Image (cartoon, rainbow, N blue to C red):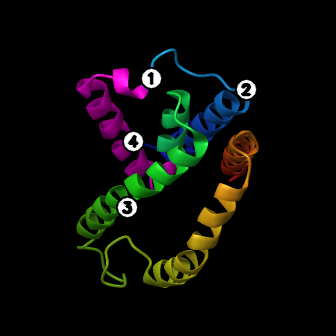
Amino acid sequence: MMSFDFMRLFFAGFEITVAAILYFGLSSSAHLDKLSRWVWLLVGYLIGLVSAIVGIGGGTLTTPFLTYNKVNIKNAIATSAAVGLPIAIAGVFGFIIAGWHLENTSGLGFIDTQALLSIVTMSVIFTPLGAKVSHQIDGKKLKKFFALFLAVLGVLVLSF
């Protein structure tokens, strides 16, 4: 089993590295339509695996991958949102099944139902606003903002 410290350092390091790549505009010489099916499958495998391990919906992995491969930041964010849904659904079932046997839970395994209901309620209300705002911001500024957000996230994770 991976230790909390390893996961924390891995996630923080990844976030800070991705933030630097996005902020400084580094990109691949390849383009998405040139990537082989095997690359797509490997990327999907890694994004799904890492997302479940560190408890993210996949957007913090998918958006940087897409922008690195020359997808417009606004399209990358929208695609990441769409990719996040099946990742989240698979993760939910995995964490319910993995924690099903535990006592003193809400009946949903490792999932905290109070947090689930509170966060989902507010997220559903405010996500359309976030989508609207992201399309009103210049793409370069949005990319820099996203990079700074990831860097702050990485630093916060290091402080735990």
Where the N terminus falls, by quadrant?
top left
Which residue is under mark 2? 24
Q: Mark 2 is on which residue type?
A: Phe
Q: Mark 3 or mark 2, which is nearer the start of the sequence?
A: 2
Q: Secondary structure at mark 4?
A: helix
Q: Mark 1 or mark 3, which is nearer the start of the sequence?
A: 1
Which residue is under mark 1? 31
Callout 2 environment at 10 Å: few (<14), some (14 to 19), or many (20+)?
Answer: few
Q: Mark 4 or mark 3, which is nearer the start of the sequence?
A: 4
Number of the front mark, 4 or 2: 2
Number of the front mark, 3 or 1: 1
Residue 39 located within the stretch drawn in magenta: yes
Q: CA distance from mark 4 to mark 2?
A: 23 Å
Which residue is under mark 3? 85
In the rendered view, tell whether residue 60 sits above or below residue 37: below
Q: Mark 4 is on which residue type?
A: Ile
Residue 61 located within the stretch drawn in magenta: no
Callout 4 environment at 10 Å: few (<14), some (14 to 19), or many (20+)?
Answer: many
Q: Secondary structure at mark 3?
A: helix
Q: Mark 3 is on which residue type?
A: Leu
Which residue is under mark 4? 47
Report if residue 24 is visible in the image.
yes
Confirm or deny contact between disc 3 and disc 4 (CB under 8 A).
Answer: no
Number of the front mark, 4 or 1: 1
Q: Mark 2 or mark 4, which is nearer the start of the sequence?
A: 2
Question: How many discs appear?
Answer: 4
Q: Secondary structure at mark 1?
A: loop
Q: Mark 1 or mark 2, which is nearer the start of the sequence?
A: 2
In the rendered view, tell whether residue 124 sits above or below residue 34: below
Magenta-drawn segment: 32-59
